[in-house]
Image (spheres, rainbow, N blue to C red):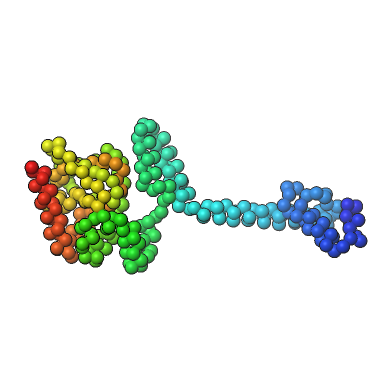
């Protein structure tokens, strides 16, 4: 045995084991051969084997620790990776500073620092679970909207499953007068202005909807709609709109009544 450990020959088992463990760990966990240089070929090969095993264990520990840390908030990491691509895209196209700032603010309001593949997640669930989640996510919209509050629950569920979430920034024109309408919108949160040719403004806020007139008439937009604040909206495409209302003709009449009233006010 090495001279350093000669004094351990007559020591207790606990001290001998502790020193042996310390020597093994110094080989496995330190860079190099640890505290004591190996003596003799057997000691050299055992030390090299110990270092290889230690390096392998250390690499596995680092790998598992990294994977654990990344999995703790994978949605935030996915958002950060996505936004880095957006920054590189903006830099590549040399977009002006104010446009970059608006894009940054849009991402912050739209995703709020977390990104999910929501369509894929909902697509993997059964229909009852999917409907339950959508009803829960849209509970504030349903509670604030008289159209939904007094309607058949089956109609509400049919509508909600076809809605698409969208975010608009202050000053954005959600709808432009004279364009072909392909969507209508439900306001979850925010304030919009309906602008007509006579420069008359009408404000709509949480629980209101707009854009249904041209879906019913199959014509062009009769007014422009501008976002006054950050708006969190749900859009409904014209094909889905007609598909749902075919099953619920009473609700089509409810939309038509509101549309006629709005057309009268625009005409005035």
Tell me if 67 is positioned left or right of 18 in this view. Answer: left
Relative to residue 188, is residue 228 depicted above or below?
above
In which quarter of the view is residue 83 placed? Answer: top left
Please name whichever residue, 87 or 106, is drawn nearer the observer in this view of the structure. Answer: 106
Tell me if 144 is positioned left or right of 261 in this view. Answer: right
Image point (39%, 60%), residue name: 121
Relative to residue 124, is residue 59 depicted above or below?
above
Tell me if 128 is positioned left or right of 154 in this view. Answer: right
Please name whichever residue, 148 or 68, is drawn nearer the observer in this view of the structure. Answer: 148
The N terminus - image quarter? bottom right
Q: Position of residue 74 (x, y in %)?
A: 48, 53
Image point (21%, 42%), residue name: 193
In which quarter of the view is residue 231 placed? Answer: top left
Q: Is residue 74 visible?
A: yes
Q: Position of residue 157 (x, y in %)?
A: 27, 63
Image point (14%, 53%), residue name: 258
In which quarter of the view is residue 57 placed? Answer: bottom right
Q: Is residue 218 visible?
A: no
The C terminus - image quarter? top left
Tell me if 108 is positioned left or right of 215 in this view. Answer: right
Q: Position of residue 60 (x, y in %)?
A: 63, 56
Image point (24%, 62%), residue name: 156
Count the labels in the image.
0
Q: Position of residue 187 (x, y in %)?
A: 26, 50
């Amino acid at each position: 045995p090495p001279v350093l450990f000669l004094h351990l020959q007559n020591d207790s088992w606990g001290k001998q084991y502790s020193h042996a463990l310390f020597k093994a760990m110094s080989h496995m966990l330190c860079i190099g051969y640890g505290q004591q240089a190996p003596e003799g070929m057997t000691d050299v090969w055992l030390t090299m084997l110990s270092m290889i095993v230690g390096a392998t264990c250390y690499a596995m520990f680092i790998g598992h620790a990294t994977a654990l840390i990344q999995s703790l908030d994978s949605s935030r990491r996915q958002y950060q990776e996505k936004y880095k691509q957006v920054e590189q895209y903006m830099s590549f196209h040399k977009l002006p500073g104010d446009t970059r700032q608006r894009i940054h603010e849009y991402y912050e309001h739209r995703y709020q620092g977390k990104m999910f593949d929501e369509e894929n997640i909902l697509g993997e669930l059964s229909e009852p679970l999917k409907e339950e989640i959508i009803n829960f996510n849209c509970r504030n919209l349903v509670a604030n909207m008289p159209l939904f509050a007094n309607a058949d629950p089956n109609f509400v569920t049919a509508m909600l499953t076809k809605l698409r979430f969208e975010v608009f920034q202050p000053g954005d024109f959600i709808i432009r007068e004279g364009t072909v309408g392909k969507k209508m919108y439900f306001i979850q949160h925010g304030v919009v202005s309906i602008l007509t040719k006579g420069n008359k403004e009408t404000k709509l806020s949480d629980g209101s909807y707009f854009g249904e007139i041209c879906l019913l008439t199959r014509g062009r937009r009769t007014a422009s709609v501008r976002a006054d604040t950050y708006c969190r909206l749900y859009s409904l495409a014209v094909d889905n709109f007609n598909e749902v209302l075919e099953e619920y003709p009473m609700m089509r009449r409810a939309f038509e009544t509101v549309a006629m009233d709005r057309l009268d006010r625009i005409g005035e």
